[in-house]
Amino acid sequence: MKRLALAAALVVLTTLPFWAGGTFYINIGSQILLYAVFALGINILVGYAGLVTLGHAGLLGIAAYTAARLLNGGHGHPAAVTAALALTLAAAALFATLALRGSGSGIGFVMITLAIGQIVWGVAYRWISITNGDNGISVSSRPSPLGLSLTAPAHFYWATLVVFLGALGSIAMLVASPFGASLRGTRDQPRRMAALGYHVWMIRFLAFLLSGLWSGVAGLLFLYYNQFVSPQAVALTASAEALLMVIAGGSGTLLGPVVGAGLVVVMKNVASAYIERWNFVLGAIFVAIVVFMPEGLVPGAARLWRRATARTAAPTVAAAVPAPGEGPAQ
Amino acid sequence: MSLWLVLAVNSVTLGGLLFLLSAGFSLIFGLMRIPNLTHGSFFMLGGYFAASLIEWGLGFWPAAMVSGLLVAALGGLVERLILRRLAGAELAQVLVTLGLSFMIADVCLKVWTGDPVRIGTPPALQGVTSVGSFAFPTYRLAISLVAVAFAVALWALLDRTRLGAMIRAGVDDPDMARVAGIRVSRLFTIVFCLGAWLAGFAGVIGGPILSVYPGLDQEMLPLALVVVILGGSGSLLGSLVGSFIVGFLYNFGQAMFPELAYVVLFLPMLIVLVVRPQGLFGRPAV
């Protein structure tokens, strides 16, 4: 059953350019997949390590800006991609060291990542000689891996799909691995994990690096998709949107971030055609999710579904056990 | 007047504003463990409220008081209606306060448009004050004095009154404070309103220097965060020292390396986190 659903989803995703009905929708598909990669990366930290980050747009931005600079400097795609990922990893290592050090002593991880993310934004915005400031940097070409040009929307979609499946597969393997189990252990019981001899700091550090790596990959996809990067990509709103994807879908679940990415991208593209005030809607969704569905849409919907099916399947049990306060009067 | 002196005065002024902003943030985080990401929005809202009140004919200082109270009331509502239900759930608190800050920013954009709104300098404080052979802008001196006065008042409140003792007890050990008969939940509301009030008030008195514009919230919030990271959470002295460090670095950084002003902020954060992760005046976590 599960395999059948997976195969069906795979077929639907692969054939999307044929039935989506136009470039606009294919591009939305690419956007969803590229943000899904980003959200999957963030979910390693937020969902499995229990560390809430608001600075990952900074890592996405570092990858995108590095690649854009190198490409415009006349370097080839392989060199630009390698250097961008290497620099993103180095930055992730630095950020992780700072954020983990502070959070061990009471100053929130989220506050430090937010401050660092805003500093990266400030650099993108103000260091004009490197980043071209508010005007951003344009890139003229997409790469052609194995000689296949990615200029056409459908081709780019398929390339993004391959990367997305790679991210999903590797993160699924990670979660199922002993490392994944120890990561969840540090989320739930850091003290016991330390007492059991696990190196909690190192486990979290590695999780940060992995999530940074996938953020960097998402940054490259972002750059190649838009062929443009500007400080907007690094802004707090971008980090917040990505966090919303993770939470909306259900943090700490494998497919939650993917559903969340689809939801947010569709809302942003479709709703913003009708609603002028996207930021207000984004904020309102945050508040509504926390108040009404704190565990996210996927687990939340599952809970509601279970409750609904339990009610229809076992009405006799429900009727036999009186609810508190409804018992027979004495 | 030499450039350096101008920069120094500007740094002290910014430091004063940051102190008002970050003292509230630090107290809220210290007592309630809530990273209040709406704090920048409170600052911006204070400025906008005052601009409208002044336009309707109120004087500068009454407008500052009233806007501070309006922001405090809003903060109280947020705390009572929403944050109260989310005690201990850091992710939920982050999401809600961030979501609220987006909503507030968008409403402000709609109501006050995208153009910067300027708040006029109060008439009595216009012009310059001469000290020896130097002339200082009077209003900037006044802000520094107000910040110092607030620092002393807050210190007296926390250190010399019954309420302050209860707040300190709550910061140290909320459960024990509850057992001892202190109504910690009421303290939460009081401290949250006080923090919101300080932020709103800072937004008003910062108005004549910074003016009020969309994005001011997201510009001030990270500065407050850096102050708290430097000074340590829950420490008034830490906020004060951190504010002036950030004020000086930001102004001098902007003057000397205009493109790298934000990176200059990054360095002290890096050093403090490596050498003394609990912040300069913070206590290490138990």
Image (spheres, rainbow, N blue to C red):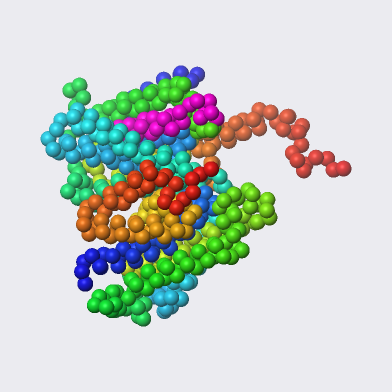
- Outermost residue toward the left? A74
Q: Can the viewer see residue B188 in this picture? A: no
Q: Please provide percent x and percent y for residue A188.
A: 53, 33
Q: Is residue B145 visible?
A: yes
- Which residue is depicted at the point 57% across and 58% down? B167
The quarter of the image holding the C terminus of chain A is top right
The span picked out in magenta is A192-217
At horizontal 17% and vertical 36% (from top left) the residue drawn is A70
Towards the viewer: A228 or B92: B92
Q: In x, y percent, where is residue A269?
A: 35, 43
- Residue B159 occupies which quadrant of the picture? bottom right
Residue B58 highlighted magenta (yes or no): no
Task: From the top left corner, tell me how far across and down residue B252 is, in percent.
Answer: 26, 59
* Residue A15 horizontal side relative to residue A318, left or right: left
**Which of the 4 quarters of the picture holds residue B166?**
bottom right
Q: Is residue A198 magenta?
A: yes
The residue nearer to you, when weighing A73 against B273, is B273
Q: Is residue A142 left or right of residue A291?
A: left
